[in-house]
Image (cartoon, rainbow, N blue to C red):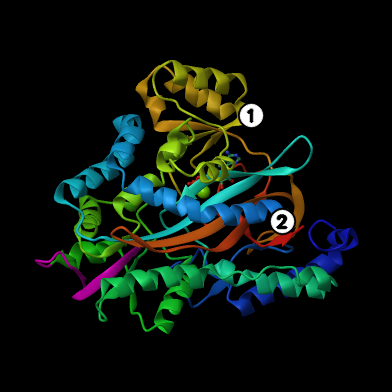
Amino acid sequence: MAQGVPDEVMMNTALIKELADVAKDAALLQGVLMRIQETPNSSEVVTYAPFTLFPTPVPKAVFLQALAVQTHYNTLVDMISQDPDFLQEALASTIAVDDFTARLFRIHQQILKEGRSQSIVLGLNRSDYMLDQRDDRSSSLKQIEINTFAASFGGLSSRTPDVHRHILKVAGSLEESQRILDNNPAAGLARAVAKAWELYGSEKAIVMFLVEESQRNIFDQRYIESELWKRNIPTKRKRFDDVSKTGYLDQDKRLFVDAQEVAVVYFRNGYMPQNYTSEQTWDARLLMERSLAVKCPDISTHLAGTKKVQQVLARPGVLEKFFPDQPQVVEQIRATFAGLYTLDMGPEGDKTVAMALAAPEGFVLKPQREGGGNNIYGSEICQVLQEVKGSAERMAYILMDKIRPVPVQNYLLRRDAPLQISNCLSELGVFGVYVRQGKDMVMNDCVGHLLRTKSSEHSDGGVAAGVAVLDNPLLV
Ligand code: ADP
Ligand code: MG
């Protein structure tokens, strides 16, 4: 009974149908919600956010390992963001060929030249992992990526434990239901935002959620907003357009949008090239970066979260530079690295190309993009590499070992999708927060987790992309 229910339950179609109905109502009752595709900007009609019928077994040791390394990842991201030489060197080849990263890098350089106006730094990260199956069938924790920008589902994942507890009880698995962990990333994320707001020190200034045009996943963000309002911290949702039209800096570089002072800009939009629809959007980003508002993330922390930086960190000796006196921290972080390979021009990159062409099934080819659906797998790796291998264009990518988790059977509940058993793969995310003021790290915590599960037919894609669904770990 891998998922917490006996095999008879998994195979009993009538019972599964009944449980799925119960589960959907439980999700609605708990507020595991999403707006519907037809009306992404209205809450008149909403649906449940997609989720698994049953939780997924996760070995306790690897789960705890992922939690334990999180504060070190926070420290690492923060140190990278403060190391202009490292960023310059790590991203030199990427920015030569990738226009989007190059544009971000130019903003970063301009800020460095002008001098950072704000010494308060707020980081809300989510480090994602898959469990690679070893030959002896044990599993090993491997990082997929770290998200320093707009890491989502901290809100909704605070509400899913009660849904799975309820389903397991109804399915007759009371003991398993009691093993579903509490989880409240929304509270932890809000605690960090609140700390940054407090340090900024102006009661009337708002926390500005910089949000997408299409706001299907609004409820995920509303949980964090609501935690802030509980502390009497005002929040407002604004778009790039609002900043373009009404934003300005006063002589002290305080940011005003729609005539309100902004203490914290929490970016939930702005990580994809298509988010920047015009020059005005880029101007708005620059305006916010130059301002006294605390940015989450600021431009250098945004760059610290690129896949190229991830690959450079995996090179021998690089982690040691960041943690010179802490070999055990280096070891803890490195244990979570999968094989990562450069495609820079030169013999090392040539070797990567040859290795990928010889066994494409063993790798994932990644451009510098976020948001799901951009990575390249299998035979397509050969097509792309054949095209770019002789030119600098290949430097826009990194190559990574493909992680192979053990598939687990489950039912994925999604509006309008047929109820059928699927072979599923899961990805564990861990939320980390930090707040630094000048040299003082005033907060550095691990604040919760997220399990997302998808059918093994799909190589790529998250919940927002319509591929993965929300889940909970059942520790085994
Ligand atoms: P994005 O920034 O688009 O989210 P990710 O690196 O997280 O990019 O990759 C997106 C998805 O692709 C992941 O959620 C995972 O399902 C799959 N994926 C990424 N890297 C690997 C890998 N090394 N092995 C197996 N699957 C991967
Ligand atoms: Mg991802």
Residue nearest the observer in this picture, 416 or 221: 221
Residue at horizontal 25 percent and vertical 71 percent from the top: 262
Residue 3: quadrant of the picture: bottom right
Q: What residue did someone put label 2 on? A: 60
Q: Is residue 121 above or below residue 140?
A: below
Element under disc 1:
helix
Q: Residues within 10 Å of mark 1 (few under 14, many from 20)?
A: some
Q: Is residue 368 above or below residue 451?
A: above
Disc 1 marks a residue whose amino acid type is Glu
Residue 350 picture location, percent across and down: 47, 17
Residue 30: quadrant of the picture: bottom right
Q: How many marks?
A: 2
- Quarter of the rendering occupied by the C terminus: bottom right
Q: Is residue 66 above or below residue 138?
A: below
Residue 387 picture location, percent across and down: 45, 21
The magenta-colored residue range is 250-266
Q: Is residue 341 visible?
A: yes
Q: What residue did someone put label 1 on? A: 361
Question: Earlier along the polypeptide chain: callout 2 or callout 1?
Answer: 2
Q: Is residue 343 above or below residue 410?
A: above
